[in-house]
């Protein structure tokens, strides 16, 4: 019996601890240089030429960010300390001529000085990284597990990593910790905070939730424990179960907002350090709800094209309007259910989203499915013309989620909501076989759930740019939505003060500014012969009527130009709400007790 148990133990841990084939060691001997040092040991690979690969993007952030650009010279040695030939064969791949060597040790450094939720950062106050930005994998072996040893700088006392700790030690440094990863996806999906962060935890949905706080701020830990737990409970209630055994929040309190990035059992949030005051607190909780909802929607329920990642190239999908848009819908609805919003406050958020989307010129140009597909080249690379041509799959997708929610509630007479449909998707495309869903499968599953043909809905509002008939969808829920066409006097430009210069940031399509020939990046110097700043020009323009003529002196580069213009108008829709409480509306806006 003892021999059998020992053999079972050996078989269980082979490929994870005993006879390990991949081991990474991360160190940071001089944080002030902003370099992480990586030593990767690869054992018992059969290939004579071994290619190691570094990702070029992070799942959840759909832009090729070229992480290998931060990597210095890659060197390799065999088990006897002999140098091995290393040849870079593409922008993110290195070929090691190992011959018959049984063990290869690879060393490189990664410059890390960009503190966002998707990159890596190191200085004398802390270190932070995402696995995609630092680690490599042997080509063809993403399914291979391994171990990671982190050796913190002597001034750093705490490591926060959402990985299982190894019982085996791989370093003589007493502060080092070793973790186990099941495959490269898990390592790539791991954010790690190293420093002297403040730690606390809370229980919610039967799960321990750990929070690592970097940076000072006006947060109240005891209040966060209670309120974050409410968000977790309300989010878990949507799906009826929680797949995690433990969860980690890494929160960076900085001087600017930065958003969040979801991971399988963790998230990183970058927020303004003063965001915890009354005026912004619900925005923080909404971010918590958004990233936590991704536990189900994105990290497990995925588009079919994202079930297995290609870390070297773009991974296209039409479904980000569902993955991010539905999540954006729920991040506000969850706050209503958890008691942080009144009905009126929730309605104000909903109305604001409609007015933003319908007031964006790009909403009439780009279908939301195309916005999803082109995220790699448009959404994460906005320019001065983006507002005229693009729409956010977050906001527009959230409005489509609103419409589908209303259809379900009306069809079932308040017995079902979007929650039940999300449960069907989660069960069918993740729990049953984890194949992910195609756009066609999403549509047919929704049609089966509703018992209706949705060809026109998808043609007009998902793959087309027709205006969603909000009033029709929400009438039976007690919400009267009225569209008002507004025509206002406007030149059609956005401006900013850039080091004392009045710069045109954007020009709206079909505006008076466009007709006059004003371009983005022009510097406006004078109005009708008088030098102006931002407030001066706004005052002058505000006094003009439609078709009033005026002159601007601008600088385009080093060239001064005189532009004659006429004041014009801009027409945009505005939506107003009137809510009368009824049974279906009460069900929609129900507060979790």
Image (cartoon, rainbow, N blue to C red):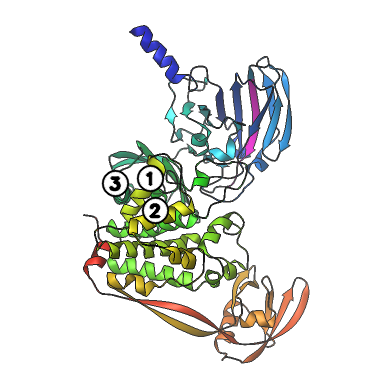
Mark 2 = which residue?
445
Residues at marks 1 and 3 touching, judged by CB atoms closer than 8 Å: no
Whether residue 419 is visible here, answered yes or no, is: yes
Q: Quadrant of the C terminus?
A: bottom left
Give the vertical position of 108 relative to 218 (above or below). above
Tell me which residue sits at (45%, 67%) in the image.
Answer: 456
Horizontal side of 578 relative to 137 (left or right) equals: left
Q: How many marks?
A: 3
First reached walking from the N terminus: tag 3 or tag 2 = 3
Q: Earlier in the sequence, mark 1 or mark 3?
A: 3
**Label 2 crowd bin: few (<14), some (14–19), many (20+), radius 10 Å:** some
* Quarter location, residue 31: top right
Residue identified by numbered label 3? 240
Which residue is more in the foreground, 419 or 81? 419
Determine which quarter of the picture holds residue 457: bottom left
Which tag is nearer the camera, tag 3 or tag 2? 2
Secondary structure state at the residue bearing disc 3: loop
Residue 359 in the image, given as x and y percentages of width and height: 49, 74
**Number of the front mark, 1 or 3:** 1
Depth order, front residue of 49/304 = 304
Q: Few, some or many C-alpha atoms within 10 Å of disc 3 (few <14, some 14-19, many ≥20)?
A: few
Residue 109 among those drawn in magenta: yes
Q: Nearer the viewer, residue 68 or 305?
A: 305
User: Which contiguous range is marked in magenta?
Assistant: 104-114
Taken as a whole, is the magenta stretch helix, strand or loop?
strand
Check residue 37 for magenta coloring. no
In the displayed structure image, the side of residue 426 where residue 439 appears, left or right: right
Cα distance in 3D space between marks 1 and 3: 15 Å
Q: Which residue is mark 1?
A: 428
Q: Are marks 1 and 2 in contact (CB under 8 Å)?
A: yes
Q: CA distance from mark 1 to mark 2?
A: 9 Å
């Amino acid at each position: 019996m003892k021999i059998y148990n020992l053999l079972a133990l050996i078989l269980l841990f082979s490929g994870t601890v005993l006879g390990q084939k991949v081991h990474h060691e991360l160190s940071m001997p001089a944080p002030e240089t902003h370099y992480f040092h990586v030593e990767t040991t690869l054992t018992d690979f059969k290939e004579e030429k071994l290619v190691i690969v570094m990702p070029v993007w992070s799942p959840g952030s759909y832009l090729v960010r070229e992480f290998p650009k931060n990597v210095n010279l890659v060197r390799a040695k065999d088990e006897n300390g002999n140098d091995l030939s290393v040849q870079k064969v593409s922008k993110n791949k290195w070929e090691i001529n190992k011959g018959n060597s049984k063990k290869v040790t690879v060393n490189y450094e990664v410059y890390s000085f960009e503190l966002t939720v998707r990159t890596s950062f190191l200085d004398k106050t802390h270190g932070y990284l995402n696995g995609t930005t630092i680690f490599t994998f042997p080509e063809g072996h993403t399914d291979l597990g391994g171990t990671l040893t982190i050796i913190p700088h002597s001034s750093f006392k705490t490591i926060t990593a959402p990985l299982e700790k190894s019982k085996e030690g791989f370093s003589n440094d007493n502060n080092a910790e070793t973790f186990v990863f099941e495959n490269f996806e898990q390592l790539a999906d791991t954010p790690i905070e190293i420093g002297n962060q403040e730690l606390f935890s809370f229980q919610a949905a039967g799960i321990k939730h750990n929070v690592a706080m970097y940076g000072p701020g006006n947060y109240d830990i005891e209040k966060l424990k209670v309120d974050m737990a409410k968000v977790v409970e309300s989010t878990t209630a949507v799906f009826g179960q929680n797949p995690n055994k433990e969860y980690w929040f890494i929160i960076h309190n900085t001087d600017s907002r930065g958003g969040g990035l979801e991971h399988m059992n963790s998230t990183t949030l970058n927020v303004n350090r003063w965001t915890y005051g009354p005026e912004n607190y619900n925005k923080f909780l909404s971010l918590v709800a958004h990233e936590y909802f991704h536990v189900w929607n994105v990290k497990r329920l995925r588009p079919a094209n994202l079930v297995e990642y290609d870390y070297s190239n773009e991974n296209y999908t039409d479904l980000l309007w569902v993955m991010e848009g539905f999540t954006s819908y729920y991040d506000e609805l969850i706050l209503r259910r958890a008691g942080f919003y009144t009905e009126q406050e929730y309605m104000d958020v909903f109305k604001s989203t409609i007015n933003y989307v319908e007031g964006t010129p790009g909403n009439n140009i780009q279908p939301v499915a195309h916005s999803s597909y082109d995220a790699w080249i448009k959404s994460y690379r906005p320019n001065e013309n983006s507002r005229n041509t693009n729409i956010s799959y977050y906001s527009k997708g959230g409005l489509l989620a609103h419409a589908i929610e209303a259809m379900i509630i009306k069809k079932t007479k308040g017995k079902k909501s979007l929650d039940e449909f999300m449960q069907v998707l989660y069960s069918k495309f993740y729990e049953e076989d984890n194949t992910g869903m195609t756009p066609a499968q999403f549509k047919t599953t929704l049609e089966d759930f509703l018992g209706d043909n949705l060809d026109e809905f998808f043609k007009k509002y998902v793959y087309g740019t027709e205006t969603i008939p909000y009033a029709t969808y929400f009438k039976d829920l007690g919400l009267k939505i009225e569209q008002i066409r507004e025509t206002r006097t406007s030149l059609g430009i956005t401006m900013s003060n850039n080091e004392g210069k009045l710069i045109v940031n954007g020009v709206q399509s079909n505006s008076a500014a466009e007709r006059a020939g004003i371009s983005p990046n022009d510097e406006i110097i004078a109005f009708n012969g008088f030098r102006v700043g931002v407030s001066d020009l706004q005052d002058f323009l505000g006094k003009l009527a439609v078709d009033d003529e005026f002159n601007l002196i601008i600088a385009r580069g080093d060239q001064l130009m005189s532009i004659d213009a006429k004041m014009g108008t801009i027409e945009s829709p505005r939506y107003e709400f009137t809510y009368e409480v009824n049974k279906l509306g009460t069900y929609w806006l129900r507060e979790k007790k």
